[in-house]
Image: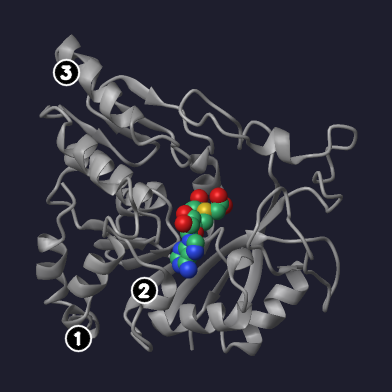
């Protein structure tokens, strides 16, 4: 069930976030409405039809694993798989649930492994994950010790995937996904100890506004973790594709790392630094049994896989960290 009662209760105890409660239920209702998402009733029905199974264990530290096959009957396992498949496409993961592997399009665990060594210790932190997809990294942040994690993502299907899994990960856990874009956050919250923005910046038409909005989510000294597509080059270099990039619409700015660091400084962040650079491999992003649509192999030029089908440099992703003033 998609139920925010516990989150709203929890927010009462966070002074910086309490005032948000005045608008939040209304925002959630507007964004989780069947007028906006015609298939939402089907997704809700799938979540509600999931069998009740109590997991014997939960693993969140090295991977996300819920229980084991012997926790459930064969009929329950069949029902579980049938309902989860109704929430296709499964992009972020992987998940293992009662022995059933959900082999997602992305190895999001590999991204987490690249990011984790550069995070300020997660213990007891209040974490925001902007554009969190189905919330895979929210659970990993919680597994690393965060006290509460709030993910936001405007896609209602990802919200349904999140609450399908939360049913087994524990309804009482202080990890939630709100069906909101970053533009729905109140200005100047100054609340979070760590804010993630991973895979979002190149979708924003105004990157400076995005960076400023991210800064406003953080308490003074809080850490921004920014992951985005970059190009090779020096200060000032930036690709703005006129058409699509790797078949993606709605793409805007692909800066070099030096350019992005300077944007962060301009937006008031302290000590921005590039801590990881990675060319996305065909093993990290691929079509699977749980994601039947096109994936990276279809987005690259078959003659020269260092280029996208449009002739742009193939996806290279950087992780930058910086502190809020
Ligand atoms: N205005 C917006 N505000 C917030 N989120 C948005 C907005 N617009 C789109 N999104 C969401 O941003 C996510 C981008 S994916 C990154 C997922 C995860 N972070 C990852 O790092 O794997 C991209 C990728 O696959 O890398 C999608 O889930 C969108 O719905």
Colouring convention used in this rendered image of the protein: one colour
Q: Quadrant of residue 69?
A: top left
At x 56% / y 58%, what residue is drawn? 199
Of the image marks 2 and 3, the number of the one nearer the N terminus: 3
Position in image of residue 246 (x %, y %) = 72, 48
Find residue 56 and report its horizontal and vertical position in percent: 15, 27
Above or below: residue 169 compared with residue 27: above
Residue occupying the point 17% across, 12% down: 75
Tell me if residue 88 comes above or below residue 28 in the rendering. above
CB atoms of marks 3 and 1 within 8 Å: no
Q: Which residue is mark 2?
A: 193
Q: Which one is earlier in the sequence, the residue at label 1 or at label 2?
A: 1
Find numbered disc 3 in the image and state the secondary structure of the residue it sits on. Answer: helix
Distance Cα–Cα, label 3 vs label 1 = 42 Å
Q: Which residue is mark 1?
A: 19
Can residue 119 be seen here? The reply is no
Question: Disc 2 beta carbon < 8 A from ligand 1?
Answer: no
Q: CA distance from mark 1 to mark 2?
A: 18 Å
Does any atom of ligand 1 lie closer than 8 Å to the CB of label 3? no
């Amino acid at each position: 069930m998609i139920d925010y009662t516990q989150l709203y209760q929890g927010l009462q105890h966070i002074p910086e976030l309490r005032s948000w409660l005045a608008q939040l239920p209304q925002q959630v209702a507007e964004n989780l409405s069947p007028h906006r998402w015609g298939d939402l009733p089907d997704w809700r029905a799938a979540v509600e039809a999931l069998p009740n199974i109590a997991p014997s264990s939960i693993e969140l530290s090295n991977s996300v694993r819920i229980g084991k096959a012997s926790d459930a009957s064969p009929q329950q396992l069949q029902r579980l798989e049938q309902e989860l498949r109704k929430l296709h496409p499964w992009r972020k993961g992987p998940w293992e649930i009662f022995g059933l592997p959900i082999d997602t399009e992305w190895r999001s665990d590999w991204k987490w492994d690249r990011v984790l060594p550069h995070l300020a210790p997660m213990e007891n932190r209040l974490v925001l994950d902007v554009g969190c997809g189905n919330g895979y990294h929210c659970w990993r942040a919680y597994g690393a010790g965060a006290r509460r994690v709030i993910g936001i993502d405007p896609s209602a299907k990802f919200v349904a995937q999140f609450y399908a899994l939360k049913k087994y990960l524990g309804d009482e856990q202080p990890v939630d996904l709100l069906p909101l874009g970053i533009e729905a956050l109140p200005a100047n919250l100054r609340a979070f100890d760590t804010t993630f923005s991973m895979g979002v910046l190149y979708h924003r038409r105004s990157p400076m506004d995005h960076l400023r909005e991210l800064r406003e989510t953080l308490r003074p000294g809080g850490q921004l973790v920014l992951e985005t597509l970059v190009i090779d080059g020096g200060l000032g270099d930036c690709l703005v594709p006129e058409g699509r990039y790797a078949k993606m619409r709605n793409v805007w700015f692909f800066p070099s790392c030096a350019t992005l660091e300077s944007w962060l400084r301009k937006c008031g962040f302290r000590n921005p630094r590039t801590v990881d650079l990675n060319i996305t491999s065909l093993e990290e992003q691929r079509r699977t049994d749980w994601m039947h649509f096109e994936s990276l192999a279809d987005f690259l030029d078959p003659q020269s896989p260092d280029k996208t089908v449009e002739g742009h440099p193939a996806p290279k992703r950087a992780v930058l960290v910086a502190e809020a003033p």
